[in-house]
Image (cartoon, helix red, strand yellow):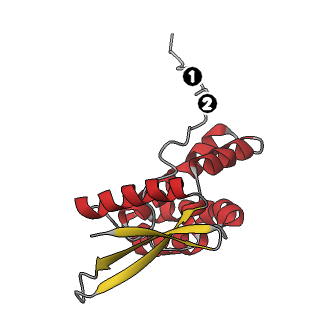
Amino acid sequence: MIGSIHKKGKTYYIVFRLHDSGTGKLNQKWIPAGKSKKAADTKLNELMGDVHDGTYREIKKIIFAEFARLWLSSYAEMKLKPSTLRSYRDIINNHLIPLMGDYQLNEITTVKLQRYVAMRLKKVKPKTVINELVPLKKMFRHAVKWSYLKVNPAGDVERPSFDEKEIEILMLD
């Protein structure tokens, strides 16, 4: 497989052909690679390495809100207890979708998620934020498995720390 770089306007593109496993036909792919030739060369080398190693996956485009609904219906409804599902649905619909719903899934970065954590800590307790991170991390893990993302941006999000209250045990004298 050979790839090349073409410039259209001010943007460089990687152009290559890939066999469709279903039809056997060659499909030409144009992938935006940035504003500089150097960035395009780097991306082309990385992409060709993935293609030759057999690890290349075409990333599907979807907005966060749509993926969240897909994840809830395709995974969470089948695997989670009703109370957990209800909790996850509330977190997704009341907190995550209002803030990130219109973003393309691949536009959500670890930095954006860490900002979300910091913003939520100003309003709620750390344990609440940790509870909100659980479905978020699971969703992004599935996004990678299902070829919507190459890497999980939630994987490196720092959980807030909190002090657990020590329970006093009463002793009978």
Judged by depth in the image, the label closer to the viewer, 1 or 2, is: 2
Looking at the picture, tell me which residue is in the foreground, 51 or 122: 51
x 33%, y 77%: residue? 17
Q: SS class of the residue under badge 1?
A: loop
Q: SS class of the residue under badge 2?
A: loop
**To which quarter of the image does residue 99 belong?**
bottom right
Q: Split into 4 quadrants, where in the image is the N terminus?
A: bottom left
Looking at the picture, tell me which residue is in the foreground, 83 or 141: 141
Alpha-carbon distance for marks 1 and 2? Answer: 12 Å
Is residue 120 depicted above or below 40 in this figure?
above
Looking at the picture, tell me which residue is in the foreground, 157 or 161: 157
Is residue 101 depicted above or below 153 in this figure?
below
x 66%, y 63%: residue? 100
- The location of residue 6, given as percent across then percent down, is 50, 71
Left-right relation of 172 to 142:
right
- The location of residue 155, given as percent across then percent down, is 47, 46
Pointer 2 residue: 162
Pointer 1 residue: 166
Q: Is residue 111 visible?
A: yes
Q: Mark 2 is on which residue type?
A: Phe
